[in-house]
Image (cartoon, rainbow, N blue to C red):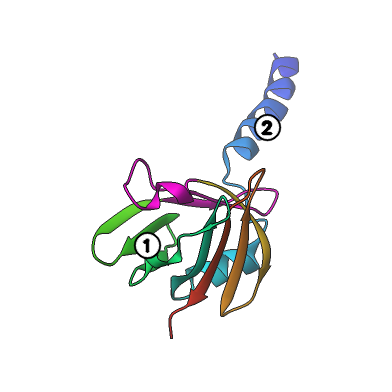
Amino acid sequence: MKRLYYLSIPLFLLLVLSSCRKEDEHPEITNTLKNGSWEVASFYHVDHDETEGYEGYKITFTQLETVSASGTNFYTGKWIITTEGDLQMDFGNTFRFERFNAKWHIVNYNDQVIQLDIVDGTDHLVLQKIQ
């Protein structure tokens, strides 16, 4: 009986530790995204400038990994920072923001500008903090 008891302790610890939510591995970019609202400064899709189609939209990233875009219309989706440090967004099948449904490599960022390139693609996105 003691043997069973001693075997159950490691299994219990493994279960508890695996069920805990992993700490954010990239807190700097996560905090930068959540700190304020952003606008699309430029967006190139397959070498075509599509920035104009996103003028007037305010993009907000929340604590609950929800992203919203409000302007002429309102769109909502999900976002995460992957373990590799990439930004992944999913707005679902929306007319305008479905092009953002991808994993984006964070090329450069500060508290005012975030430069992104789509992973394995040719799209480029620059988000600028709304003052």
58 horizontally vs 29: left or right: left
Dots 2, 1 in contact, CB < 8 A: no
User: Magenta segment: does it hold 100?
Assistant: yes
Please tell me how many numbered marks the rendered image carries. Answer: 2
Q: What residue do we see at 45% from left, 72% from top?
A: 38
Is 49 placed above or below 14 here? below
Give residue 63's quadrant in the image.
Answer: bottom left
The image shows residue 7 at horizontal and vertical percentages of 73, 21
Give residue 57's quadrant in the image.
Answer: bottom left
Q: Which residue position holds label 1?
A: 53
> Which residue type carries mark 2?
Leu
Q: Which residue position holds label 2?
A: 14
> Which residue type carries mark 1?
Gly
Q: Residue furthest top?
A: 1
**What is the span of residues highlighted in magenta in the rendered image?**
78-101
Q: What residue do we see at 58% from left, 75% from top?
A: 113
6 horizontally vs 106: left or right: right
Q: Nearer the viewer, residue 8 or 39?
A: 39
Q: Earlier in the sequence, mark 2 or mark 1?
A: 2
Is 51 placed above or below 65 here? below
Crowd around label 2: few <14 · some 14–19 · many ≥20 (10 Å): few
Of badges 2 and 1, the one in the foreground is 1
Crowd around label 1: few <14 · some 14–19 · many ≥20 (10 Å): few
User: Magenta segment: does it hold 90?
Assistant: yes
The image shows residue 15 at horizontal and vertical percentages of 62, 31
Q: Quarter of the image for the N terminus: give it.
A: top right
